[in-house]
Amino acid sequence: MRKILITGSNGQLARCIADAAVRFPQFAFTFLDKSELDITDAAAVGAYFRGNSYYACINTAAYTNVEKAESEPERAYAVNAEGVRNLAVNCAEYDVLLLHVSTDYVFDGRKKVSYVETDATNPLNVYGASKLKGEKYVTESGARHYIVRTSWLYSQYGHNFYNTIVKHASAGRDLTITTEQTGTPTNANDLAQALLQIVQDESADYGVYHFSNEGSATWYDFANAILDAHPQFKEVTLAKTSHYPTFAARPKNSVLETDKIKRPFKIAPLNWEESLRMLINSTYGKE
């Protein structure tokens, strides 16, 4: 039985992988949080890999607070870059397949159509820059690897845009959401399934892949779809704004093209609206 290590087990993606794991009985999973394996501690990571044997490592540990990263870049780089290097060099040394999750924010958003894997990167903020440096460490490590960029990740778990909208709407608060950015809301449950399928169907075509749900939306479109799918939120007022001030600059367009990932793996991403409805139905359908 192939053993799979999942880092960052308290995060939303790792929790979604835990839910998806039941559909992959051929794998034995180990989920570790920061207290059990701090990826920024090079000595600890080295000792762990020396003492344990794995077929693959899926790294979901990340510093994801885009705004806060601007004021504490050292922490962002420690996790998203140096921590990733620690994992990558050990995966290379012990022949462990590494799946590393990255972001659409490695792009500057100036492209008018969706981004392909070979497009030039040019992050606008510390978060994106730290994730890009992590990508480079993985590529340079010599490990068998897949770097999977995703976008606008949400789920029923943790702190994300979906849960924030539901929280505010449940409190009866009116909302003002930006139309300035376009991307693709991506259900972390779908990404979890895709990552495990990649491990299952490992291809020699290693490298960078994009995974998101299909289609595109503004943050306003995403919020509107969330409210529309919850009948109890019909009275909540949702307003548009073309400018919403943020500390960190964000790409105006970060839609990812996903054709490449469909070829070597049995992956067919759902439309983002369909996937959102499925999540809401599974979470609230019994109410």
Image: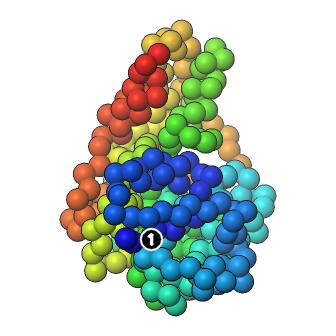
262 lies left or right of 101: left
Instruction: Give x and y (percent) for residue 225.
Output: 42, 27
Say if 174 sits above or below 241 in the image: above
Residue under the image location 39 percent in, 60 percent down = 195
Image quarter where the N terminus lies is: bottom left
Instruction: Give x and y (percent) for residue 240.
Output: 53, 26
Residue under the image location 57 percent in, 33 percent down = 163
* Residue 264 seen in this snapshot: yes
205 lies left or right of 5: left
Instruction: Give x and y (percent) for residue 27.
Output: 39, 64
Residue under the image location 45 percent in, 38 percent down = 218
Instruction: Give x and y (percent) for residue 249.
Output: 62, 53
The figure's colour scheme reads: rainbow
270 lies left or right of 93: left
Q: Badge 1 local density, few (<14 within 10 Å), some, or many (20+)?
A: some
Q: Secondary structure at mark 1?
A: strand
Numbered disc total: 1
The answer to which of 160 and 55 lies nearer the viewer is 55
Say if 99 sits above or below 9 in the image: below
Say if 160 sits above or below 238 in the image: below
Residue ID for mark 1: 3
Query: Quadrant location of residue 279?
Result: top left
Say if 233 sits above or below 29 in the image: above
Residue under the image location 67 percent in, 69 percent down = 37
Residue extending furthest toward the top: 235
Query: Quadrant location of residue 48?
Result: bottom right
Report the amino acid beneath label 1. Answer: Lys
Residue extending furthest toward the front: 1
* Residue 198 seen in this snapshot: no
